[in-house]
Image (tube, rainbow, N blue to C red):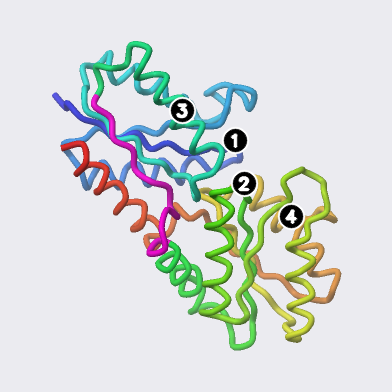
Amino acid sequence: MMQQAVVLAAHGSRHPGAMAALAGFRDRLAAAYPDWRVEIARTVGRKHGPASDFGGVRRVAAVLEALVADGLRRVVVQSLHVVPGEEYHEMLAALGRYLENGGARLAVSVGAPLLSDRDDVDAVAEAVVSGLADRRARGEGLVVMGHGAPPPGAGFYTALGERLTRLDPLAHFGTMPRERGAPCPDIERIRAALAASRTSTVWLRPFFTVAGAHACNDLAGDGPTSWRAILEAAGIHCRPALAGLIESRAFTAVWREHLRRAMDRLG
């Protein structure tokens, strides 16, 4: 009987197919670590809907309770967040409360989000640029949309954007506005930069764990405020490449290294 488990803690998505990408990553990890039980948990709150809206995936505390009930005592909670933002820190706080209120039977280690230090930023920037290298023609730009976060998460987004531009002057990174429906200064800045460089075609790349509603609607949707619509209204042809980060081995390699370190800390 397995005595240890990995809990993959992700925001989760109600968008069709998004949770399947997380399930695929879970299955690959389970094959790589046959002595570990691997589960998915969501970190988004109850106000977003019940587990049934997320392919049956429960919140972190509920998954931990089920593991304890099955006799498991050693758990790595691996964050599948992109940066250490609000939701990641809320997860840490909730995990602390759980352990204080009867969950002390568990030995727990936490794996860091995708971007947690300078080496992560460098590796991820290389992966972003190289990921479409065989599809981008000479002179085509790359526009990457992230979610955005308050500090300290915001600093990682800024560092990634700067690193991307150094690697490829035609690569641009921006984040969504904090308030839905508010004007987005980042896409205005990117549009101006593309016009200045006379870039007529760009690839659109979501910087989200899974390609859910933000990727399909806010980035590449048909609505007038999507980044695609704003750029195409300026005469810039857009080619969406809508895949979540969890679908690329280059990005999951970073998460897997964080998982390995968390396993080592567990002892």
Crowdedness of circle 3 by 10 Å Cα count: few (<14), some, many (20+)? few
Q: Residue at x 40, y 34 (%)?
A: 40
Callout 3 amino acid: Ala
Which residue was labeled with disc 1? 14
Residue 222 picture location, percent across and down? 79, 55
Mark 3: secondary structure: helix
Callout 1 amino acid: Arg
* The quadrant where residue 97 appears: top left
Q: Is residue 238 above or below residue 49?
A: below
Which residue was labeled with disc 2? 150
Mark 2: secondary structure: loop
* Range of magenta residues: 107-120
Crowdedness of circle 2 by 10 Å Cα count: few (<14), some, many (20+)? few
Q: Is residue 185 above or below residue 45?
A: below
Which residue was labeled with disc 4? 221
Mark 4: secondary structure: loop
With 236 as the anchor, is 62 left or right in this view?
left
Answer with mark 2 or mark 3, whichever residue precedes in sequence. Answer: 3
With 109 as the anchor, is 15 left or right in this view?
right
Which residue was labeled with disc 3? 93
Tag 3–tag 1 contact (CB < 8 Å): no
Q: Nearer the viewer, residue 179 or 19?
A: 179
Q: CA distance from mark 3 to mark 1?
A: 24 Å
